């Protein structure tokens, strides 16, 4: 059932915000036809597209995927105040969309990018603790015989 509701929710959110498919596609960095397929259910947005959609509509990914927002077209909605997670998402996207960072981190996985993003925000002392913890985990993994 969720598979059929996400396309409907994407279309409703776009229309309530008076966005065109071209505009949303541009925000996502995809062609309009790809976005159209998201709204018809022919394709499912990947994780990065879901992050961008949540940011565009200023809702959590949880709300987007679990479809917990009921939209009443007769009511005017004020944009909610950004949450900590939406602020983090915004900073994350700005950081990795910065041309200097985009090129620098282009070969990192999404998980590595997330680690680097948050690692940059903590104190030097915390960074050292995390590196020590990572070394311990790596040694422990190296000492564990591989599963056969």
Image (tube, rainbow, N blue to C red):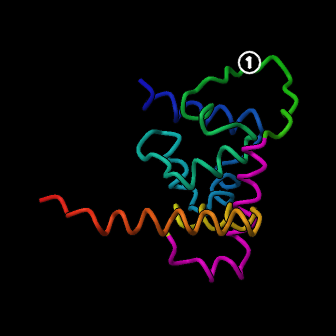
Residue hosting label 1: 72
Q: Quadrant of residue 42?
A: top left
Please report the residue visible at 67 percent of the width from the left and 24 percent of the height from the top.
69
Query: On screen, 47 above or below 94?
Result: above
**Picture coordinates of residue 34, whole percent (x, y):** 50, 55
Where 6 falls versus 101 (above or below)?
Answer: above
Secondary structure of residue under mark 1 = loop
Picture quadrant of residue 2: top left
Q: Position of residue 32 (x, y in %)?
A: 58, 56
- Identify the residue at image location x=75%, y=32%: 16
Q: Which residues are magenta?
A: 84-108
Q: Residue 47's spot in the image, x, y percent? A: 52, 51
Question: 100 or 139: which is nearer to us?
Answer: 139
Residue located 49% across and 52% down the image? 46
Image quadrant occupied by the C terminus: bottom left
Camera-side residue: 50 or 77? 50
Q: Quadrant of the N terminus?
A: top left
Asked if residue 93 is among those painted magenta in the image, a careful observer would answer yes
């Amino acid at each position: 059932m969720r598979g059929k509701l996400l396309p409907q929710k994407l279309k409703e959110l776009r229309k309530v915000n008076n966005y065109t498919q071209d505009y949303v596609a541009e925000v996502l960095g995809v062609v309009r036809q790809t976005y159209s397929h998201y709204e018809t259910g022919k394709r499912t947005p990947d994780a990065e597209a879901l992050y961008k959609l949540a940011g565009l509509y200023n809702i959590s990914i949880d709300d987007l995927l679990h479809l917990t927002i009921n939209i009443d077209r007769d009511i005017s909605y004020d944009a909610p105040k950004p949450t900590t997670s939406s602020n983090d998402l915004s900073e994350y996207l700005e950081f990795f969309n910065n041309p200097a960072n985009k090129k620098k981190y282009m070969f990192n996985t999404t998980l590595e990018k997330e680690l680097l993003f948050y690692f940059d925000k903590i104190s030097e002392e915390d960074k050292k603790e995390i590196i020590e913890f990572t070394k311990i985990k790596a040694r422990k993994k190296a000492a564990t015989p591989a599963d056969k």
